[in-house]
């Protein structure tokens, strides 16, 4: 499944929350997430343990550039996260663990994540999820519009993922 996404440092989470409440079509709630990243030859692989969504293995491919970028991923539900974590840790090795409190909003099909990440700080993330490849330019523009709406400076955009900052 593809999306267009950005991740950026957030200097004022409460101000971002006020903007999110204004532009959002839905508030999905507050989610405690623990992401365990495993070493991979290409792409990324993490096990997400979520207080809202349960546990899932998430393999994904995404370039490390600032600004809106395409990500291709799968969400694979797992009923045995401890076993999966143990096996993958032994098979691939654990790269890092990222823990965060994520406030999740939707603006149509764009997920707005306001993240408070343990030991890293506060961030904002947009993910415009789509199915049809011809929609990619339109989704890119939605993300650009939200960047402007939230007043995100280019210097605040992050190239990689939280695992790269950690």
Image: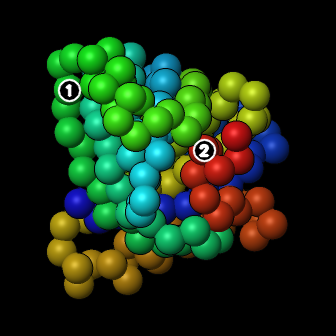
> How far across and how far down the image is residue 48, in percent?
39, 30
Q: CA distance from mark 1 to mark 2?
A: 21 Å
| Picture quadrant where residue 16 is located | top right
Is 137 above or below relative to 132?
below
- Closer-to-camera residue (157/38): 38
Quarter of the image with the C terminus in it:
top right
Give the left or right position of residue 39, taking residue 18 as reference. left
Is 159 above or below relative to 75?
below
> How far across and how far down the image is residue 94, in percent?
50, 34
Q: Residues within 10 Å of mark 2 (few under 14, many from 20)?
A: some
Residue 78 got which mark? 1
- Going 76% across and 35% down the picture, which residue do you hit? 121
Where disc 1 sits, the SS reads strand
Give the left or right position of residue 62, taking residue 157 as reference. left
For mark 2, what is the residue? 163
- Closer-to-camera residue (86/3): 86
> How far across and how far down the image is residue 165, in percent?
71, 47
Who comes first in sequence, dot 1 or dot 2? 1
| Picture quadrant where residue 158 is located | bottom right
Q: Is residue 4 visible?
A: no
């Amino acid at each position: 499944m593809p999306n267009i996404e950005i991740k950026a440092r957030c200097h004022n989470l409460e101000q971002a929350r006020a903007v999110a409440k204004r532009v959002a079509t839905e508030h999905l709630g507050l989610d405690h997430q623990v992401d365990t990243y495993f070493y991979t030859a290409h792409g990324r692989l993490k096990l997400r343990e979520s207080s809202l969504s349960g546990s899932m293995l998430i393999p994904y491919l995404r370039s490390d550039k600032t600004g809106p970028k395409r990500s291709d991923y799968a969400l694979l539900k797992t009923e045995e996260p401890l076993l999966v974590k143990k096996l993958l840790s032994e098979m691939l090795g654990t790269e890092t663990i990222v823990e965060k409190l994520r406030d999740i909003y939707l603006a149509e099909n764009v997920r707005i994540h306001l993240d408070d990440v343990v030991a890293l700080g506060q961030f904002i993330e947009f993910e415009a999820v789509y199915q049809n490849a011809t929609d990619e330019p339109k989704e890119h523009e939605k993300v650009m519009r939200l960047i402007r709406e939230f007043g995100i400076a280019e210097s605040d955009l992050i190239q990689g993922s939280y695992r790269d900052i950690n």
